[in-house]
Amino acid sequence: MIRKLLRRVFRRNGTPSAVAPAVVPAERHRIHREHVSRAALRVCDTLQQAGHRAYVVGGAVRDLIAGIVPKDFDVATDATPEQVRALFRRSRIIGRRFQIVHVMFGPETIEVSTFRAAHNEDTVKDEHGRVLRDNVWGSIEEDAARRDFTVNALYYDPATQTVLDYHHGVADLQQKVLRMIGEPRTRYREDPVRMLRAVRLSAKLGLALDPAVKNPIREMAELMENVPAARLFDEMLKLLFSGHAVECLKRLRDEGLHHGLLPLLDVILEQPMGEKFVLLALANTDARVRAGKPTSPGFLFATLLWHEVLANWEARKAKKELATPALYSAMDEVLDIQGEKLAITRRIAGDIKEIWALQPRFEKRSGKFPYRLLEQPRFRAAYDFLLLRAASGETSQELADWWTEFQDADPERREAMQVADTSPKKPRRRRTQSRKEAESTGEAAQ
Ligand code: ATP
Ligand code: MG
């Protein structure tokens, strides 16, 4: 009897369960209804009209309270996926195990999930305690308890403009602390990716890690090895495109979350030659993300691996391989090795190669060469890449400035700008050959 009572009051991990949520009024959470996407408001309204509970949830509520524009809006409800699907004409059920519904409104997609149950003895885990399957629907209290951090377990009701706060997330957000729901070690064992999420969210929101969240990371970091590569890759992409990549990397390093655990991070941090270049590239990506400009994984990965390509290319040229074929072999070799390790998809690999293959062509500034380069569909990305190379000192600033001017110059100025090939004089036969070579680079990169 007493055990039963205790179990009701205390969750399995020993923390008191929040029985009733705090109902936080608008003057405390300060979310303006106008800042919530119209699509999310419509979804909540339609579900509520049909007699269901429905809330904007998770990252969006957290970001709105923190004064950040949310990336996307998720809704949580007690309606089943079929019930949700039936209410919205443009919607579809996705996922096999735990089904969620995508509801489309114009360009916006709202992800609607049914409240999920907490883990229990029946949850399927691997030998390290990592949760492999959880597909049971539950109550809103359970849904809140299975989320990772207190600031992520907030439910905004647009109808009453109140926030349901089960784990003191609003106060934590206002006091700028990232606190785990439940016992951090257990939660990391269930899903080691939460260590990466802790670092990313603390950097993004400017929160300090609660010592209980921070302390176990160093010793538990190796659990990351059991996480499937594709999931790690997705999580690293989120980190790199969070708009706070430089800060995230610094924090990952401080927490001891790097060597050998995250192949991508090793690539970034273990580049004696290219570190400046990589940091510039990440800072540049951060600035673009924050300014709402487009970014692409292809471009970023091209920067992360460029110095490896350069080293490989140099080694080949030293062995008297011809420059252009040597570059292509270097690109292939680096992508073969890193592509597999990092789980880079084929499409991204294609984008990366296009950017690399155009680099030597920036050296050719006479005759038809520069005009042809301008017509390349990937010119813009390749040019942005050149700017970073120049800023890091790997190529000359004069070359970058030349291209900055050339692309916008009028035809007369462009003619006047032609620069004779300044590469060291070579014997006649070699020169003919290198010109052919340059042509073939042009063909190959089309
Ligand atoms: P972002 O700003 O990148 O979108 P987010 O916190 O919204 O950050 P999502 O991956 O969109 O991250 O997840 C949405 C919500 O799902 C989170 O706010 C959190 O409540 C919950 N969640 C996500 N990943 C986990 C996890 N590994 N463990 C527990 N809860 C999670
Ligand atoms: Mg999100």
Image (cartoon, rainbow, N blue to C red):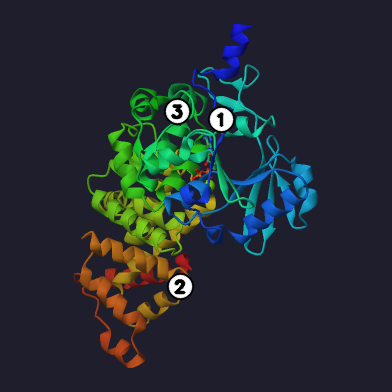
Give the numbered dot on residue 145: 1
**Disc 2 vs disc 1: which is toward the camera?**
1
Residue 240 coordinates in the image, percent (x, y)? 40, 49
Q: Could you tell me which residue is drawn at 68 percent across and 36 percent down?
A: 98
Neighbour class for label 3 at 10 Å: few (<14), some, many (≥20)? few
Contact flag, marks 2 and 3 (Cβ < 8 Å) = no
Q: Amino acid at mark 2?
A: Gln
Above or below, 36 against 344 in this view is: below
In the rendered image, which residue does mark 2 sit on? 376
**Disc 1 vs disc 3: which is toward the camera?**
1
In the rendered image, which residue does mark 3 sit on? 225
Contact flag, marks 2 and 1 (Cβ < 8 Å) = no
Mark 1 vs ligand 1: CB under 8 Å?
no
Say whether residue 335 is left or right of residue 230.
left
Say whether residue 390 is left or right of residue 349.
left
Dot 2 or dot 3: first in sequence order is 3
Disc 3 is placed on an element classified as helix
Above or below, 289 against 345 in this view is: below
Dot 1 or dot 3: first in sequence order is 1
Disc 2 to disc 1, C-alpha distance: 52 Å
Disc 2 to disc 3, C-alpha distance: 41 Å
Disc 2 is placed on an element classified as loop
Residue 255 figure quarter: top left
Disc 1 is placed on an element classified as helix
Q: Amino acid at mark 3?
A: Glu
Neighbour class for label 1 at 10 Å: few (<14), some, many (≥20)? many
Observer-nearest of 122 and 170 = 170
